[in-house]
Amino acid sequence: MPSETSLTTQTQREKRENCWRLRDAYFTCLDFAEASTANNVGSENVKNSNLDKKQNKNVIDSRECTQKKKEYEEACPSSWIVYFNKRRELEKQQRIRVVAAKELELSSGISESEISAG
């Protein structure tokens, strides 16, 4: 029979893994919602746009992420939520900077090392 300590450790591990799983599901939903929005800028109504049915199925509205956010916030400690959310935003900003630096490099002929040194 497992000891109380090992059961507690197992329970804590399961809670952590559940938190991470729900965080990943929520962040994935947000990523798809942001991509959907970016891909459909300018269309008055995504459902009435010229997208075929298959494409419409892939369009995600950020409101669809509300339930996933609720589950994530219920499963994770608030300090973790703050950390995960900040980390996600920082990673998004870093990706934007990398893309911008590469575009600058391509358009101006400046090398990446020159950008970093500047």
Image (cartoon, grey):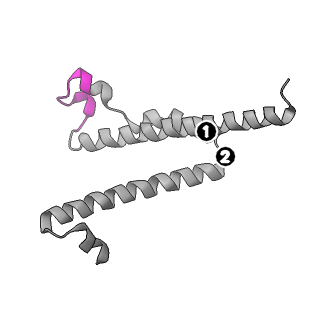
- The residue lying furthest to the bottom in this view is 118
Residue on which disc 2 sits: 77
- Quick one: quadrant of the C terminus? bottom left
Identify the magenta region: 44-55
Amino acid identity at mark 2:
Pro
Inspect the magenta stretch and tell me whether residue 51 lies in it. yes
Q: Residue furthest top?
A: 53
Q: Nearer the viewer, residue 114 or 90?
A: 114
Instruction: Tell me which corner region of the image, top left, top right, bottom left or bottom right, holds residue 15.
Output: top right
Residue 13 drawn at (x, y percent): 69, 37
Per the image, label 1 sits on a secondary structure element best described as helix
Circle 2/circle 1 CB separation < 8 Å: yes
Q: Nearer the viewer, residue 54 or 115?
A: 115
The answer to whether any part of residue 70 appears in the image is no
Label 1 CA crowd tier, 10 Å (few <14, some 14–19, many 20+): many
Q: Nearer the viewer, residue 91 or 60?
A: 91
Question: Which quadrant would residue 3 be assigned to in this image?
Answer: top right
For mark 1, what is the residue?
Answer: 19
